[in-house]
Amino acid sequence: MSLSLFTGFLTGLALIFSVAIFIWRLRLYNQLTRHVDRAKPKGDVKSGVLYAYTTGMAPWAKESTRLHMLSYLRGVAFHMGIFLGLGLLLASPWIHLLPAVLRGILAVGAGAGAVFGMVGFAMRLMEHNLRAVSTKDDLFAVLLVSLFLAVAALWLSVPDALPAFYLVSAVMLVYAPFSKIRHCIFFAYSRLYYGKFIGSRAVLPHSQQVVR
C-alpha cells in the first residue's frame, strides 16, 4: 500500500470518527431541557428566523462588524478558504484530473485562506482585547486550520505532498468535535434560536417586521 493510500485511509477513519462524535453531541444537545418562553408572541417567528439566516448576518446588521469591517472581511475570506479546503479534501482522489491552471487557481485560494487565518492568529496575540478572551483552544484551532489550508495549497502545487495533506486533515478532523471548530454545527442552532426570539418579540428591522 502506498503512503498516499495509507494516509488517505487514516483520513477516512478520522472523518467517520468526527461525524460520529458530532452526531453524538447533537443528540445530547437535543435532549437538553429547553427554556419555555411564556410571553405572548408579538411578531412572526418565521420572519425572525429568515432574518437571522440572511440579512441578520450582513456586516451592517451588527455594530461590531460595522466598526471593524476589515476584520469581518478577513473572517469571511478565512471561512471561504476553509470551505474550499474541505471541498478539496473530499475531491482529493480526483483532483489530479483537473487542468494544471485550475489546480493553480485552487492553490492560490487555499493559500490565501491560510494567510487570512494566520492574520487572525496574529491578531489574537497582538490585540489586547482579543488576547484577553482567547483561550489556548482558540489559538490552536486557528493555527491548525490555517496549516490545513497551507498544506492543501502545497499539495496542489506539489502532488507528492498529498500524504502530508491527509495527515494534517486527519488531525484536524479528530480534533474538531472537541474544540471551538465545532461551532460549524452549533452556529446554525444559535442563529435559529436567535431568530425565533427576535421574531416573536417583534424587534426586527421595520422593513422586515411582521407584527401580529
Image (cartoon, grey):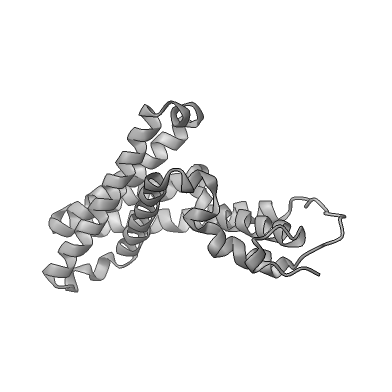
- For image coordinates 25% across by 60% down, the residue present is 5
| Residue 100 is at least partly visible in this image | yes
Q: Is residue 122 above or below residue 195?
A: above
- For image coordinates 78% across by 51% down, the residue present is 33
Q: Is residue 141 above or below residue 50?
A: above
The N terminus, quarter of image: bottom left
Please give left or right for residue 51 compared with residue 2 in the image. right
Q: Number of labelled discs?
A: 0
| Residue 2 is at least partly visible in this image | no
The C terminus, quarter of image: bottom right
x, y percentage for residue 53? Answer: 57, 63
- For image coordinates 33% across by 34% down, the residue present is 122
Please give left or right for residue 86 compared with residue 45 in the image. left
x, y percentage for residue 76? Answer: 39, 54
- For image coordinates 12% across by 68% down, the residue present is 100
Please give left or right for residue 208 compared with residue 1 in the image. right
x, y percentage for residue 88? Answer: 30, 63
The answer to which image quadrant residue 160 occupies is bottom left
Question: Which one is in front, 66 or 124?
Answer: 66
x, y percentage for residue 201? Answer: 76, 58
